[in-house]
Amino acid sequence: SIGINMPAKTVVFTNTRKWDGKDFRWVTSGEYIQMSGRAGRRGKDDRGIVIQMLDEKMEPSVCKGILYGDPDPLNSSYKIKYNMLLNMMRVEDVDPEYLLRASFHQYQKEKDAPGLLQEAQESEQKASQIIVDLIPDTPQQPPSSSDNNNGEDDDIPKKDVEQMVSEYYQMDQQLYTTQLKMKQIVHQPQHVLKFLINSNNVGRFLDVVIDDEHFGWGILVKCQRKPGTRTGGEAGRNASKAESPSSDYTLDVLLQCVDRHFDTDNTNKSRQEDVENSNLLWRGTVRHCRSIKKNDQEDIKLASMRVFTIELQNIERISAVKVSVAQDIHPIEARRNASVTLNEVKKRCPEGIPLLDPITDLKIKDPNFTTLMDRAKALTERMSSHTLSTTYPEQERHQLVQLYETKASYIQRAKLLKDEARTCETIALKEDLKKMKRVLKKLGHVDVQGVIQTKGRCACEINTANELVVVELIFTGVFNDLSVEQCVALLSCMTYDERNKEDDDPTKGMKGYLANPFLKLQEVARTVA
């Protein structure tokens, strides 16, 4: 590897880690290929020997990646510089964009476009195969005279059905966005904490959603501030500003759930014993527990009451109902009584558990919230009076909306893939090229027609420093009154790239005959920047 024809039949790796300037890391596959390939000379040795010394434990996957992994990817680091651009502009009939099109950087960018277009075409085909219409499981019977609307709605063309579902879906999405904004306002600590933080609120019903999984109504056990929040002096206060205030509090809520263990272990002989002992576990997490499926008798038998720790953003709704809860909820009997109480309240409120009113109870006076409420109400009324709501029952309407949502997602994905492919096919660095040309015109290196001027010709000869700054120093006469020593000291600033570690004033401690030229250099650099 040093250009000397020396025998090297054997390569020994004394360590499998190397220092990369920041940390010790495993040798990559490309580095291993380069170094181990030195063992044995082609045409002179029959084979080469590679010895790998291990001084620490290595996972099999790491070892396999080093020995059999792919070589390091070759990525273009092509960049346009002002010196390069000016040298191309000074040659007649040379287009800088042609050089960009022929670059390896452009090739790497364009090679992904065909695959993206193929994916977009597949998404469009999947979308075209989805027909937004109801397909009956059994042959339809001719409508009788007693049917609603005399069967007129059964003859709606498929195109009109899709258009109707599209209108309904758009309104549903607008309603969801509006309700999400309302939820963000309602869940601000100044509005909800007074109904959660005190011991008087223990036993309040909360509707909980964790990681997009709806667990339904639960019973509040405790609400407290997280340990260590808003402490630690000025540093702690600055850190808390970066987070949402709602993340400063945690709540313990009793929720009905099913252990995920029962979803995978269906053949275990001790299943009955596990069912009987499931109530012994009092702490629940979304990793080990899931919500109860609606009207699923098997889930109801497997359900247990467990305590989940959540945050304010996990609360979907807050009820006005409060029940009595035992102080110690660890015993099985205490949690079982809470489950019975929860089911009884649901049974007594068939139309829904009463909620806290955001205006009269939470005292929200934000005018934006009132606007959002009016918008949500108007959207709800429009959806309830929409043709889709009056024509189809809830289950069929839900099925149609799901079909349209799936079709819309394929169409949206195809659009995004096409946009990405179009971006890949555009000339790389073209915008940078336009900006650089504007800078050259502004600084006087080229004229309006793009003809290179004297400053530009001078910049063409500078390739070891920032050509624009050096040329400005020359043409503003900064070097005229400087001695040779001062010129050398000033030009050394153009090649010294070590940063000031403490961000102190760079002229601190500098002598006056050097500080003045340095200040002029800073002024020119600001002009160029």
Image: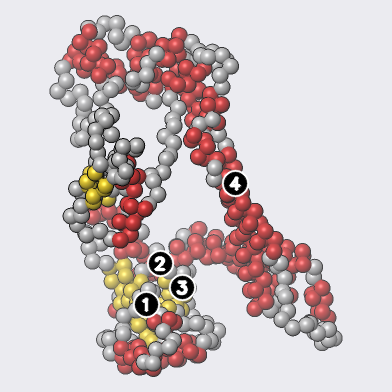
Query: Which mark, by number, is residue 114?
Result: 4
Q: Nearer the viewer, mark 1 or mark 3?
A: 1
Badge 1 or badge 4: first in the primary sequence: 4
Residue with the mark numbered 1: 288
Q: Nearer the viewer, mark 1 or mark 2?
A: 1
Alpha-carbon neighbours of circle 1 within 10 Å: few (<14), some, or many (≥20)? few
Disc nearer the start of the sequence (2/4): 4
Q: Is label 4 in contact with label 3 (beta carbons under 8 Å)?
A: no
Labels 1 & 3 near each other (Cβ < 8 A): no
Residue, x 23% and y 55% (percent of image)?
236
Residue type, label 4 = Pro
Please give the label number shown on residue 313: 2
- List x then y, in percent, for residue 88: 50, 18
Q: Is residue 104 left or right of residue 380?
A: left
Asked if disc 1 and disc 2 are in contact, CB closer than 8 Å, the reply is: no
Is tag 1's residue or tag 3's residue first in the polypeptide sequence?
3
Picture quadrant of residue 195: bottom left
Q: CA distance from mark 1 to mark 2?
A: 21 Å
Residue 231 lies in quadrant:
bottom left
Check disc 1 and give the amino acid type.
His
Between marks 2 and 4 in the image, the one whose residue lies nearer the viewer: 4
Q: Which residue is mark 3?
A: 213
